Structures are given as C-alpha cells and as structure tokens.
Image: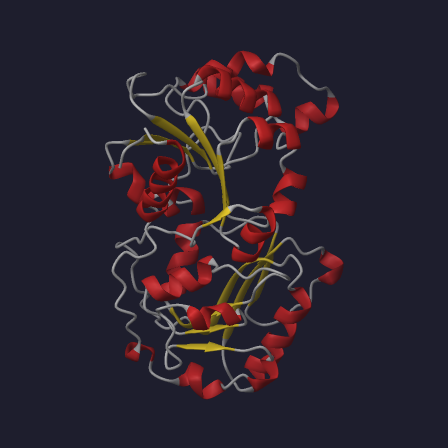
Amino acid sequence: MKYNYIYIGSSDLGHLKPNLDGYYNICIQDLRNCKNIQVVSMPLENNILFLRILYALHHSGKINKIVKLPLKFLWYPLYFKSRFDDNEPLCIIFQNLNFSSNYFYYVRKKFPKAKIVKIHRDNIELTRKRCKGLTDDVINNVFDLSLSFDEAEAKKYNYLWFSEFESKLNDISQSENYPECDVFFAGKAKDRLEKLYAIYDKLTSFGLKVHYYIVGIPKEKQIQLDGVTYSNKLMSYKEMLYHTVNCRCVLDVNQENTVGYTSRFLEAVMYNKPLIADNLNIRASKFYNPDFIQVYDDWNDLDPNFVKKDEKRVDYHYNGEFSPIHLIEQIDHELVARYGI
C-alpha cells in the first residue's frame, strides 16, 4: 500500500475504554496487525483515565440535554495523535461519523495534505439524520472519497461501493448443549418486526426451536413468545457470535430498501453455518450454494427440511475474503488512481 492510514473505527463515544468485544472492534481486528494502519477506537483512548472521565462527562448526553456544555473544541487535539511521519502520504478514514462539523473541519485543517475518506456501513440517509455534523458543506469540503456498503446507494450518491467486511475470530467455543437452537436471529428490529414475527410463527409451526434477541421494541409492541428476548441494548458482539456458532442455522432479514450484504451473511460464511435470508443479491455471491443458503422472496415458501439437515455438511471454503484489509487495499488503489502519491 502506498499510503499510511488512520482508521477512526468505533462509534462508541462516551465509553471510558474501547470495548474489544464490541461489533466495530471485532470487525476491524485484522487492521491492528498492520504496521501502516493506526486504529483509533475512540477519542482519547491512549490518554490517562482522569482525562477520559472528564471527556465523558463533558460529552454526556444526559448532561448536555439539560445544559449544552461549551468549549468541546478544546478536546480536539487529544482525540488521537498520528504515529506517522508528516512527510509520508496519509489517509484518514472515518467509519465513525458521529462528530461535530467543527471537528471534521479541524481534522481537514490539521492534516492539509492528507486524504480524508468516509465509509457508510449503514443506510446513508439514516446516518445523516443521526450524525448531525455530516452536513452538505462538510461532505463537499472535507472528504476526498466516500464509500457505501449498499451498491444501490453507492450508485445513487455517486459513491464508491465496497463489500462488507469483518475479521474472523478463532476463539469462539462450542456450547456443551450444542445446538442451542435451530434458528438464531439478533439485532435491532427497525422496520422488520412484523416480518420477524411472521417468520417466527412459520418456523415454530414446523416444530423448530427459535432464538430471537430483538433490540429497541416498545413494551406495548412486544409479544411474549418462547425463545424471544427483548432488550433495550445490543448483546455484546462476541456473545452474539457465540450464539451464531452454536445454532443450527442463521436467520438474515434485511431492512427495507437495503441490498448490501449484512453481518449475518458474513458470519454464516466465516463460521460455516447454514443461512436462510431474503436478500436476493446473495445469489450473486461466490459463496452462494443452495445446499448451504436458502434465499426467499416469500417467507411462506420456507423449507423446514433445510434447517433440519446436518449443518456439518456446510463448508464455504472461506479464506479471508471479508477481511477489512481488502477495504484498505481498495481505498489505496482508488486514491493512487485519483490523486497519485
């Protein structure tokens, strides 16, 4: 690679230390072993605990709802310190886009020669609603390159498309009670709740044991069902991988108007699990095999015998194709093609 990289990767602002079992940190684990990539999991992560506590208090959502605390720009120089020589080509990648517009401009000014890139691992419009600092002016004047995991959105916004990525862990243990369930799903309900309930009814009507862990459902919309857990917070990602490895089959239900590969698809491939899904684009993947993956545009067609088959038959011959290293290589190639060194 021609550039050095600073990868601002986690969106867990406010934590006192990086959550190494969290989704974002596990996904980029492979990057930590690269000498030309510096991973920044959270602001001030290498500073003393006292400063991190002060930072967390200053940026506390609860406190700032009562009174908007000023002078947050004073923290900007402490967010991270580049370990690379100023004369070497540098690229700063923002996966975490939940910063103020002032901070984006600060980075642009502090690193005038650097290329600044943003990547979207979620719906672009939802991200912009959530990340108030991502204004039109910031997008046009700060970033040199933008990428999206969703191919349709990438075309719509004239962004570069990237295939979703995740680092594989090799220390996920098998349960003494394996398999824990026949079908496993975990995630935020978003616009999928009614579909998840319908799929649950279909699966259990065949006598299959289902485990759902659904986040963000108001109590009045919760239906008490065997094997369904409701929560206000996400399960730790490492725990979710444990349940993935210890189920017979993974369930992947896409959000409306989303066509990119999800983490459920990546997990199924990396850990050799059968998959049932409704993302028709999976059929175009090199890993698609109807013996291992069933894709439905109508869940009424779901075949229970697919779930009941011996899951040991599954082998996708995965060889690191989803590693985030390939994303960095893609960005490096694009930057060299557009800007040279």
Q: Is residue 191 above or below residue 159?
A: below
Residue at 69% across, 63% down: 222
Q: How many marks?
A: 0
Give the image location of residue 27, x and y in percent.
38, 47
In the depicted view, which residue is nearer to us: 277 or 206? 277
Q: Which corner quadrant holds the N terminus?
A: top left
Residue at 59% across, 79% down: 299
Q: Which corner quadrant holds the C terminus?
A: top left
Left or right: where does residue 282 sit relative to residue 205? left
In the depicted view, which residue is nearer to us: 336 or 197? 336
**Picture quadrant where residue 114 is located:** top left
What colour scheme has been applied to the protein in the rendered image? secondary structure
Give the image location of residue 169, x and y in percent.
30, 53
Q: Is residue 287 above or below residue 83?
A: below
**Picture quadrant where residue 284 is located:** bottom left
Residue at 37% across, 22% down: 46
Decide if residue 39 is in sight here: no
Left or right: where does residue 197 sit relative to residue 248? right
Decide if residue 206 is in sight here: yes
Q: Is residue 183 above or below residue 187?
A: below
Give the image location of residue 336, x and y in percent.
34, 36
Give the image location of residue 77, x and y in percent.
46, 14
Left or right: where does residue 61 sit relative to residue 303? right
